[in-house]
Amino acid sequence: MVSAPAALAERLAAIRARIADAARRAGRVPEEVTLVGVAKGQPAERVAEAVAAGLGCVGESFAQEAREKLPRVREALARAGVAPPRVHFVGRLQTNKARLVVPLCDCVESLDRAELARELARRAEARGRPLDAMVQVNLGGEPQKGGVAPEALPALLEACDALPALRVVGLMTVPEAAADEALLRRRFAALRELRDTAAHGGRALRELSMGMSGDFELAIEEGATLVRVGTALFGPREG
């Protein structure tokens, strides 16, 4: 019988192989793509096992869960002599929860309004080091999702330019759940074009966070530099 850590390591290796294949199909090198293991609802022990198996970046979706779990992950890794991972916050973030997230995270991928940008920058300045961020773009215009409208992106980026403690490094999107392959490719290509247009203004927008468990290969073919994979890596959630 395969142990739980061994099974997780096998899933991690299989996902990395799929990432590499998708990158090569697009004429890219696999090292251009970072796997973000989304640990929503996963126990600290399982997250630590994934990091010990080679996962270098962990994604969290809820501020309270991250605050309770991440210290336990770091403690488990320290006992095992394993370096802690980079941590990305990938869920929708209320402004008043920035105080919980900034001390724990290296990057917030769900920045979508100037008010949140200012609060993230204030908290980053207080902790003594800048915070990376990505602007989430709502390409499908879905009211139930976070994300700035594409036409409002330039104004938000300009507002972020005035916040030295906040480094906007790229864009993120979450396509419609029922999108077929053609629509997914259009959404991913649209985000890439928005990134490239914004970068022409001199901004260092190198990252494109797009693609999840069911569509990350398409996203890589369209230029993703980060893919967010949860259940396919960790297995069923426990919370």
Image: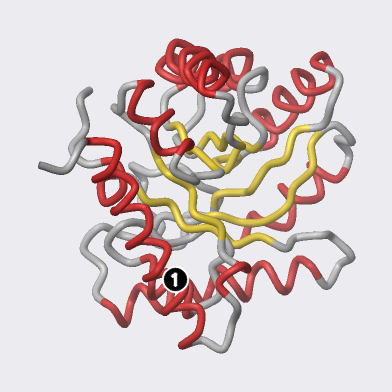
Q: How many marks are shown on the rendered structure?
A: 1
Question: Where 118 sits versus 14, above or below?
Answer: above
Judge by depth and name the residue closer to the eye, 239 or 200: 239
Question: Looking at the rendering, in which quadrant would you find the N terminus?
Answer: top left
Locate residue 116: give its quadrant.
Answer: top right
Quadrant containing the C terminus is top left
Residue 107: image x %, image y %?
Answer: 65, 38
Say how the picture is coloured. Answer: secondary structure
Report x, y in % for residue 94: 51, 23
Question: In the shown orientation, is residue 131 left or right of residue 45?
Answer: right
Residue 5 or residue 213, whichever sits in front: 5
Residue closer to the observer: 226 or 119: 226
The residue labelled by disc 1 is 219
Residue 201 relative to residue 168: left or right: right
> What residue is rendered at 47% in x and 73% in y?
20
Quadrant housing residue 40: top left
What residue appears at the point 31 percent right and 59 percent down from the top-left corner? Answer: 176
4 or 99, which is in the foreground? 4
- Judged from this view, the residue extending furthest toward the front is 1
Q: Amino acid at mark 1?
A: Ala
Q: Position of residue 90 (x, y in %)?
A: 49, 39
Taking the spot 49% from the left edge, 54% from the top edge, the residue there is 35
Placement of 56 over or under 183, stated as above or below: above
Picture quadrant where residue 84 is located: top right
Q: Position of residue 78 (x, y in %)?
A: 57, 18
On screen, residue 123 versus residue 58, left or right, reads: right
Q: Could you say whether the residue bearing mark 1 is in a helix, strand or loop?
A: helix
Which residue is drawn at the image coordinates 59% and 62% (left, top)?
Answer: 208
